Amino acid sequence: VRDAPILVLGADGYIGWPLSLALAARFPGREIVLADNFLRRRLVEEVGGQSIVPVPPIARRVAAAGEFLSISNLVHAEIDVASTELERLLAEVRPGVVFHLAHQASAPYSMRGAREAVLTLRNNEESNLRLLFALRDRHRDTHLVKLGSFGEYAKAGIDVAEGYFQPTFRGQAADRPVPYPREADDVYHVTKINDSAFIGMACRAWGLRVTDLMQSTIYGVRTAETARDPALGTRLDQDECFGTVVNRFVAQALVGHPLSVYGTGLQRTGLMYLRDAIDSLVELGDDVPAPGEHRVINHVAERGPCVLELAESVVAAAREIGVPAEIDRGTHDPRGEHLSQKPRHRVDAARLAGRATTPLAVALGELLADVAPHRDRVLSACVAPTIRWAP
Ligand SMILES: NC(=O)c1ccc[n+]([C@@H]2O[C@H](COP(=O)([O-])OP(=O)(O)OC[C@H]3O[C@@H](n4cnc5c(N)ncnc54)[C@H](O)[C@@H]3O)[C@@H](O)[C@H]2O)c1
């Protein structure tokens, strides 16, 4: 397994590209196979957005990795992961590790209408199921590292366990760990919940080896590899579908648009800086769980802040570099976020314990510096939200 190729599904994406570069740099003797069908590029165009950081086509990216990092072990395959092409690619590559990131990854997009909801459902669940069955039939010892979402968990005023817990109900204690409750209010997160349920089934029934990451929101664009040349950059979206919370606040700050804090802003969100997430993922690939173990990891570094506090941190970091940012709280509330106080639950993250992570203020300073040169690519029509899915 340790010398076998590594397959990255969704390798042209925001996380997939820097992950692929980091894997190629760390394991020069292993082939890193990049699979993507460019769905993300198409959908961002469909909603009228564009990545603020320019993203060259994949062939140029691979060439740039050779030019600026002397990386020669990247191979690109244009395939639809939610199709029989996946089985063919797996048979050809025989990977030791598969990173599965190939999803329609936007919650707002999945709630635009029935067409977008069905696209999300088919794409995400079909790819996940095809992958699990292919592993069962031909690649049982391959380690699957699957990107799930921290947004899968039901937040109901109790501490959040790491995937499984052993509850007591009416005085009766469960006799084994069971999945911590999951609940979501958008189609994208429901697909993530279903993925976790199917993965749990596949581990118990077939003895697969899976690491399932409850991934919190990632922000930032700088890794050891992407920083080497603009042609190696990863995408940073600004529109309300594909721009995630901190990345979008930074874009808004740089063009003098008030930071759009939805509702009261007291809703909590976990966060992880891109570089920290990539470093952890690279290590996890070769840390293979036992057969049948559904290893769930809460992949979240900043566990405490609410959205309003994050916006305040972005404002402070922007002011440090002379950008006079301000916050607009409550004008927009697409998800109906009416919390009157910040939730107090704790979040277990034992598997990340002891890992050094980049402090929020340092990461925000880097992010502002990385995005500022591209501020003329921020589209003013994109920065105010319009999709609403809750009364
Ligand atoms: N970015 C975050 O903050 C975050 C947080 C939690 C979870 N995640 C998860 O991490 C993974 C990667 O997210 P991302 O932010 O890099 O998103 P992304 O959209 O940039 O990356 C996904 C990539 O997969 C590709 N893809 C989608 N469907 C495909 C298919 N059927 N066949 C081939 N390629 C396909 C897309 O074109 C894209 O390049 C996703 O599963 C996402 O749900 C991301």
Image (cartoon, grey):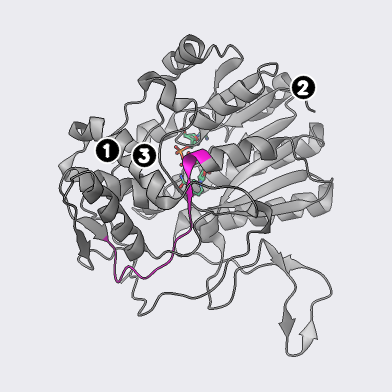
Mark 2 element type: loop
The residue wearing badge 3 is 366
Mark 1 element type: loop
284 horizontally vs 46: left or right:
right
Marks 1 and 2 sit apart, C-alpha to C-alpha, by: 40 Å
Mark 3 element type: helix
Disc 1 residue type (three-letter): Gly
Disc 3 residue type (three-letter): Glu
State the residue at coordinates (47%, 11%): 63
- 61 w.r.t. 278: above or below: above
Residue 243 is one of the magenta-drawn residues: no
Task: Give the magenta range.
Answer: 261-275
What's the mark number on residue 49? 1
The location of residue 292, given as percent across then percent down, is 82, 49
Among the two numbered marks 3 and 2 on one chain, the one whose residue lies closer to the N terminus: 2
Among the two numbered marks 1 and 3 on one chain, the one whose residue lies closer to the N terminus: 1
Question: Which of these two is toward me, 290 or 344?
Answer: 344
Tag in front: 1 or 2: 2
State the residue at coordinates (44%, 26%): 226
Residue 135 in view: yes
- Beta carbon at label 3 within 8 Å of ligand 1: no
